[in-house]
Amino acid sequence: MTRRTTITTLAAGGPGGIPVEVERRRVRRLNLRVRADGSAHLSVPWRCPLAEAQRFLDEHEAWLRTHVARRAERAAEPDDGLVPLWGRLVSPPADAAPEELWRGELAARLPEVAKRMEAVLGVRAAGWQLRIMKTRWGSCTPRTGRIRVNVRLAAYPPACLDYVVAHELTHLLEPSHNARFHALLARAFPEEAAARALLRRPAREACERGA
């Protein structure tokens, strides 16, 4: 017998919180996402009690608020045809998607930044990859020495790319985010706090304040 999908609504953070559409599906674990229109959706296994789903939403309320707000900011961005690039708003080439523009720009700039930061930290990455990532600016696999960088960094002022490259290279010296990691990163890139603050903003806002 095929079970029919059932849908209900819960609120992250309790009554008055963020409404979340909860859908029972043939999944193994709870999966929370924010759609392009800003609505939140949670897929849960058939046998998952609603109380467990509510606890999951309450635990992820901060994450959910951040991503719902980010979607709202993107929806409110003016449709003026301009694209953020290295801290400035520019007119992109005809028929070029922003991701394509950012990837090309990052591919051109990354080698110089990587070489400079590798010299500062005294390490060398085994390889670099450009990725479109939804929740990270970069990632590192210390075991293999390979580092991945989000192409969206090209939308932000250049210091943000310097920071992310330094951050991921530091993981080759210290895999965890412990005190030693932060000390090493601070020596390599003292402007960490300013770069992190820029990356918490929408790209267009970072352009306006970072240009």
Image (cartoon, rainbow, N blue to C red):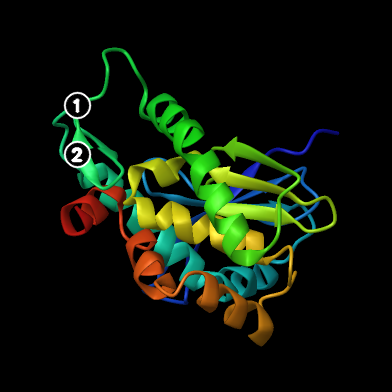
| Disc number placed over residue 91 in the picture, else none | 1
Instruction: Please name the residue shown 38% across and 59% down the image.
Output: 199
Where does the N terminus fall, quadrant-wise? Answer: top right
Total numbered circles:
2
Can residue 9 be seen here? The reply is no
As drawn, 90 above or below 39 = above
Residue 210, x across and y down, in percent: 22, 57
Q: Is residue 177 left or right of residue 15?
A: right
Q: Quadrant of residue 129?
A: top right
| Disc number placed over residue 89 in the picture, else none | 2
Label 1 sits on a secondary structure element that is: loop
Q: Quadrant of residue 143?
A: bottom right
As drawn, 95 above or below 170 = above
Residue type (three-letter) at the residue carrying disc 1: Ser
Q: In terms of depth relative to the viewer, which is nearer, 7 or 184?
A: 184
Q: In terms of depth relative to the viewer, which is nearer, 80 or 118?
A: 118
Can residue 46 be seen here? The reply is yes
Residue 44, x across and y down, in percent: 69, 54
Label 2 sits on a secondary structure element that is: strand
Residue 119, x across and y down, in percent: 60, 58
Instruction: Please name the residue shown 26% across and 55% down the image.
Output: 206
Residue type (three-letter) at the residue carrying disc 2: Leu
Mark-to-mark CA distance, 1 and 2: 7 Å
Q: Residues within 10 Å of mark 2 (few under 14, many from 20)?
A: some
Instruction: Please name the residue shown 67% across and 63% down the image.
Output: 122
